[in-house]
Amino acid sequence: MEGDGIQVERRDEIAALNSSADEVSHLALDIGGTLIKMVYFSSDSDWPVDDEGKRSSKEKGSKNCNFVNGRLHFMKFETRKINDCLQFISSKQLHHYGGWHTEAPVDCKNIIKATGGGAFKFADLFKEKLEISLDKVEEMDSLVAGANFLLKAVDREAFTYMDGEKEYLQIDHNDLYPYLLVNIGSGVSMIKVDGDGVYERVSGTSIGGGTFWGLGKLLTKCKSFDELLELSHQGNNRVIDMLVGDIYGGMDYSKIGLSSTAIASSFGKAISENKEIEDYRPEDVARSLLRMISNNIGQISYLNALRFGLKRIFFGGFFIRGHAYTMDTIAVAVNFWSKGEAKAMFLRHEGFLGVMGAFMSYPNNGLDHLMSKQLVEQLPKSACCPKHEARSPLLGDLTENGSIECSVQLCL
Amino acid sequence: MEGDGIQVERRDEIAALNSSADEVSHLALDIGGTLIKMVYFSSDSDWPVDDEGKRSSKEKGSKNCNFVNGRLHFMKFETRKINDCLQFISSKQLHHYGGWHTEAPVDCKNIIKATGGGAFKFADLFKEKLEISLDKVEEMDSLVAGANFLLKAVDREAFTYMDGEKEYLQIDHNDLYPYLLVNIGSGVSMIKVDGDGVYERVSGTSIGGGTFWGLGKLLTKCKSFDELLELSHQGNNRVIDMLVGDIYGGMDYSKIGLSSTAIASSFGKAISENKEIEDYRPEDVARSLLRMISNNIGQISYLNALRFGLKRIFFGGFFIRGHAYTMDTIAVAVNFWSKGEAKAMFLRHEGFLGVMGAFMSYPNNGLDHLMSKQLVEQLPKSACCPKHEARSPLLGDLTENGSIECSVQLCL
């Protein structure tokens, strides 16, 4: 859902990343309509790889379970630039590290967990270019597994947002379900989650991140998703939206609870003005578009939560990007339509739910084991990360590429 | 919600209309954000008016209740061209005919029932230019009264639409309530109707007719709403929308019931193509826009119907304009989201619900009396209209300006 300026896929940066000689394992991909998300784990560099990228013999046959310090790497690429992703995987020799099992047949080492529609669409391309077989993980399975893991394993994963204030939530593991998961990618999926692997996709809308960026690109000539978001921050939607006050001569429509500044018709003011698109400031167009889409997602989400009696709505997906105004609009929409009874909640690792789920689907992924025994919080502070937050191994906003220090339990 | 080509407000046409010397009564207005809707009744021309436009003395003091043959006239003007509306009212001397009561004080004769936000916004303008006081009728009250009247009094008012087939519905008057009324004007109101005057506005969306026409105007440079609708009829949304198959390599996402041709992300394909708005055919842009908006309205309407256990959803408002593709998209959306359990229904007099309600609010409007006694169907065929449909005095699609022969009961 975003453009040129943000990915770490330029050749010089890729070269810099390649200079790391860390042991790499558990590469997983989520190939969506707009973005490819990638997660892989690299242990600290005491596990050398040989020239062919295979794990060296010193670990072979080891059956011990140990904590291994390392990093979870999160990256994203634009789907339309999938060759950059392939090049990165190839140069980093990531394709040799689908899973931990060094003794698996050679064929299995070139199998990588992948989710999203692109796992189907680009399967042949991965096979042809990298000799990788994509082991497809169902998209909704992945989203739910990723969200469940993050909500359980990561302290302060979820937060509410209102009037510029973040409030982190303490989620009781025993009182997590049921909840509504709203994943805003190119399109939007709404999933009722009742437990580990127990869920139903109950709704969705085609008016999602792809609509914001697609329509926004056509209307403003912006070159990137981030540029469009930034523009929206500076804009004023009242220039183009038809407000209740525009219809009611500046008055509220108080009988039905609509203030004069409520939007009666998104982009409705464009009807009555003899202006062309060039006559509007791109900032104002971007703002109206963002409000229209965020409002709509908030409203449909609330209606679905209400339908199933769900108290919690978690919003994830790369559309949000930690963008204050987006979160604020969604939160206000949920608050407005629920008359204050429901609250929108956001996930710090919003964009990586699906790919985390794919990562979790490796049989011995280390993280899963940590989660099930809740070992995360028992780790010594030195083994946990980041340094300022001992109890949260995945703390830190992950809307951009990055990596996080982490310990995983490996049984080899 | 529409543009230049469709109103009968040009001076020559207004002059032609003025040549009619019919007695005029019960003018009512619905002044929305985009359109002004007008209804008035003219009796056949045996009730002359004097030079000042007052009802002549021969009816004064008459207290008989009689059926009077005449016509209900339906007109619309663009709100931004309100002066054309004022000119029409003035030249037709309609402002002297707020109601039937010829013996009312002169002041009262210049009081006209008006609904919509413009009844507030333009109140001073009507006072200043025409010495008319607008007697404001609450907007939702009007919509509900108009819809209830039409559904009860007019045979075959409602119909379903699917795969190009209209199916008219026989509504049992005793089994009309409750229903969801979805009025698609510039914005969209969703009203749960439980009886005459018993209703609640339960939801709405700012993504309505004003969004279609406003965004459409900016994206295609179309000059009128009708032109945009016509374009959409010829377009192909698959050019710009990101389909499930675009993400899944041509495959269905069958596990969650999405076919490869389902829209995953409206306008999402514009992300990945190096095209500017000029590179797309306006037809395709219009089609994507119409599907996006119609789908969304259908979905939110269904969710609200479900929430209140309402089996019937009636769609009205000028957005629809009897346009087959719009109705088809709404109907398909309701069918899809309800898994076939709910059906979208449309009203033949879709655009005039609010103004009919305002018209009905005159204390002795004749129509109300007809309705309450269900006299419509007892009228002799010759007094009823149109000629090919004896039992439906208001039959005929009223998406354009027009008039309908009708009998009303007058008690003077």
Image: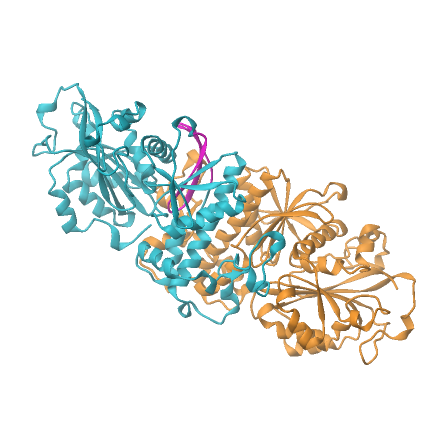
Chain colours: A orange, B cyan
Give left or right: position of A110 versus B330: right
Along the viewing direction, whichever of A18 and A229 lies nearer the viewer: A18
Picture layout, residue B248 above or below residue A94: above
Whether residue B98 appears in this view of the structure is: no
**Residue closest to the eye, A1 or B176:** B176
In the picture, the quarter occupied by the C terminus of chain A is: bottom right
Left-right relation of A374 to B364: right
Decide: is B201 above or below B9.
above
Q: Quadrant of residue B169?
A: top left
Q: Position of residue B56 (x, y in %)?
A: 9, 27
Where residue B230 appears, as percent x and y from the top left, is 33, 57
**Quarter holding the N terminus of chain A?**
bottom right
Kindly indicate the quadrant of the structure image that contains residue B401.
top left
Residue A26 in view, yes or no: yes
Q: Nearer the viewer, residue A45 or B363?
A: B363
Which secondary structure type mostly characterizes the magenta part of the structure?
A: strand
Residue shown at the point (73%, 76%) measured from the top left: A18
Residue A253 location (% of width, % of height): 40, 38
Judged from this view, the residue extending furthest toward the left is B51
Q: Is residue A318 left or right of residue A374?
A: left
Q: Is residue A64 magenta?
A: no
- Which region shows up in magenta? B177-203
Question: Most extreme residue toward the bottom, as rendered?
Answer: A51
Residue B367 x, y percent position in the rendering: 26, 28
Q: Give the camera-side residue of A341 and A31.
A: A31
Q: How many labels, in total?
A: 0
B196 magenta-colored:
yes
